[in-house]
Structures are given as structure tokens and as C-alpha cells.
Image (cartoon, rainbow, N blue to C red):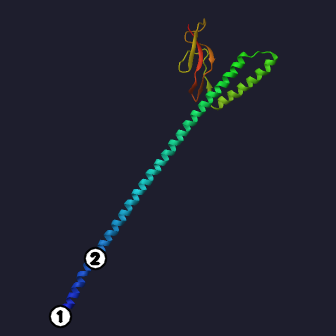
Amino acid sequence: MADKLQEDTLAGANDSEPQANNNFNQEDSESRYSEEKKTDIASIWKDKYLHLLADLENTKKRNARSYAQEAEGQKEELLIDVLQIADGLDLALIHISSEEDGRKILQGIELLREILDKFFIKYDVKMIAAFGEVFDPNFHEAIGMVQHPSAAANTVVRVERKGYLYHEKLLRPSQVLVSAG
């Protein structure tokens, strides 16, 4: 009986050895699975992070373009308002008398016009040359037609209001009288 007990104990010990190996293999497999799962989760979060970072950069660029366009539009509005000042100075220069009292006023107006011209140069505002040119509806606004003996048909014979370009874009067309032929 003692022999039988000893055999059973030995047999039990032999049986438990493969069971321990099985437990070890199962734990090792679970550990590897857990590591793979962690790696997959980390990869997913990394991809989400990179995607969000790219979205953020694109949003920054889009906002910068939007702000630049808005600023450009506000500059154009400002320049259009300043053109009215130029018009007033031009009219004053045309209608002022050249007498001594008027001479000082004329010099003051000419000085203001020079300052305004420097302002236009600084902001890349260019006057459209219209007088003597062939009428171009892209740059000229015809406000009338007149008979002119020495001008060909569709030629600008008088500029009533100067036109301007801003960065080669039409800011305001020239108002002109055109020769009928």
C-alpha cells in the first residue's frame, strides 16, 4: 500500500508538471496578447494625434489666408475712401486762380497732392493712364461721347475722374468722355 501511495504521488507529480507548463504557456500567451493589444492601442492613439495635428496645421493656414484676404479687403476700402480726397485736390487745382492770394493756396494743395502721391506709391496704387488711349471698358467708364475733330473714334478725349489700380487690380475705373469719331 505504501508503494501504491508512492506511485500515485509520483504519478501526480508527473501529471502536474505538464499542467504547470500549460499554465506558463497560457500566461506567456496572455502576456504577448496584452502587449500586442497595448501596441495596437498606442498605434491608434498615435494616428489620431497625428491626424489632429495635421488638422490643426491646416486650420492655422486657412485662418492665416482668411485674415490676409480680410486685411486686403479693408485696405481696398480705405484706399477707395482716400481717392475722394485726391479727387477734391485735383478739382481745387483745376479751379483755383493764379493770383497772389491764390498762389499760396495752390502751393499748399500741390504739396498735399504730392504727399498723397507718395502714399499711393507706398501702397502700390497706380493711376490709370486714360487720356488719348483707346477706350477700354475694363479700365474706363464712359460717361459720355463727344465730337472731337482730331481724335479717332473710341479714343478717350477727356478724363473727368481718374481711375486707379491696386496691385494691378482695378480699384476704380476712370470716368471718361469718348470721341464719337
Q: Would you say the residues marked 2 and 1 are in contact, meaning their CB atoms lie under 8 Å apart?
A: no
Q: Is residue 38 above or below residue 17?
A: above
| Name of the residue lying farthest toward the bottom | 2
Mark 2, secondary structure of its residue:
helix
Q: Which residue is mark 1?
A: 1
Q: Position of residue 83 (x, y in %)?
A: 64, 25
Under mark 2, the amino acid is Asn
Mark 2 surroundings within 10 Å by alpha-carbon count, few (fewer than 14), some (14 through 19), many (20 or more)? few
User: Quadrant of the image for the N terminus?
Assistant: bottom left
At a point 47% along the width and 51% down the height, the residue shown is 53
Name which quarter of the figure residue 64 lies in.
top right
Q: Which residue is mark 2?
A: 21
Name which quarter of the figure residue 84 lies in.
top right
Q: Is residue 162 above or below residue 23?
A: above
Under mark 1, the amino acid is Met
At a point 57% along the width and 12% down the height, the residue shown is 144
User: Quadrant of the image for the C terminus?
Assistant: top right
Name which quarter of the figure residue 118 lies in.
top right
Q: Position of residue 65 (x, y in %)?
A: 52, 39
The one nearer the camera, 175 or 168, is 175
| Name of the residue lying farthest toward the top | 149
Mark 1, secondary structure of its residue:
loop
At a point 59% along the width and 20% down the height, the residue shown is 174
2 or 1: mark nearer the eye: 1
Separation (CA) of disc 2 from disc 1: 31 Å
